[in-house]
Amino acid sequence: MKYFLISLTLLLFACASFPKKNNLESISSHTPTVINPYFSDLAMDYIYKAKINFADKSFGGIFVIKKMGPEHHRVVFTTEMGNKLFDFSFIKNEFRINFIPHEMNKKILINLLRRDLFVLINENPKILNQYRKTGDSIFLETKLKNNTYFYLTADERLHKILKTKGSKDKSSYIFAEIENDHAREIKIRHKNIKLTIDLKAI
């Protein structure tokens, strides 16, 4: 019986939700019109020096995100000499590969980039629940492409996105050096996946 109770306790803990495990308090609050403003300006070209590490490969260069219209972004990654490493378009729920070289044309890498970049450019996901942690950020729960994400805001400013599964966070998207709705530094990290993305505005 003792071992049964221990096993049951461990099972319940493992199945706990992310809010419960992290002691988040459910709240009802005003939801901002635009939750992620960092790539929302039609008049701006968002240009970063970038480094992408995937498995044992490393790619460095210039990373550009341009908002072309409502729910339409184009993302281009080139070497510092101007040679394209990839060129993607996101139009509402459609994803287009305009260009990708053979060495990056790996299904797993494309799917990861597609998911990560969609998270970065999505301005106003539907909020399902809102939570608060004492003395900490507001956690806005949403779903993107059937995955659960928590948008962490402080003073109505987004500073982190967490992709979660059950009670655990699986990926993090960190926004820093924020000036006038422009995140000058962005870091993407994955647990159990050998992919990192570092962006620094230039």
Image (spheres, rainbow, N blue to C red):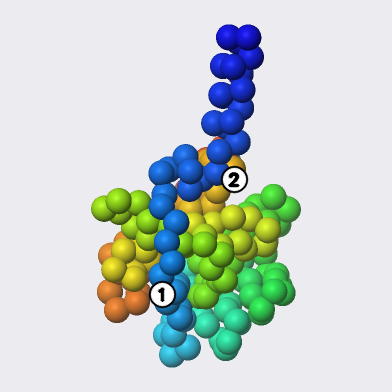
Residue 34 in the image, given as x and y percentages of width and height: 45, 78
Q: Nearer the viewer, residue 196 or 18?
A: 18
Q: Is residue 105 visible?
A: yes
Callout 1, which amino acid? His
Callout 2, which amino acid? Lys
Residue 92 located left or right of residue 188? right
Residue 57 figure quarter = top right
Residue 127 located left or right of residue 178? right
Residue 136 in the image, given as x and y percentages of width and height: 30, 54
Q: Secondary structure at mark 1?
A: loop
Q: Which residue is at 54% across, 31% downward?
A: 13
43 relative to 138, above or below: below
User: Which of the image's four quarters has the N terminus?
Assistant: top right
Q: Nearer the viewer, residue 78 or 66?
A: 66
Label number found at residue 30: 1
> From this viewpoint, which residue is outermost toward the top?
2
Q: Secondary structure at mark 2?
A: strand
**For mark 2, what is the residue?**
165
Please tell me which of labels 2 and 1 falls first in the chain: 1
User: Which of the image's four quarters has the C terminus?
Assistant: bottom left
Q: Nearer the viewer, residue 123 or 9?
A: 9
Q: Which residue is at 54% across, 52% downward?
A: 163
Q: Which residue is at 54% across, 57% downward?
A: 149
> From this viewpoint, which residue is outermost toward the front?
1
Residue 98 figure quarter = bottom right
Would you say the residues marked 2 and 1 are in contact, meaning their CB atoms lie under 8 Å apart? Answer: no
Residue 77 in the image, given as x and y percentages of width and height: 53, 67
Q: Which residue is at 57% across, 71% downward?
A: 126
Q: Nearer the viewer, residue 11 or 65?
A: 11
69 relative to 184, above or below: below
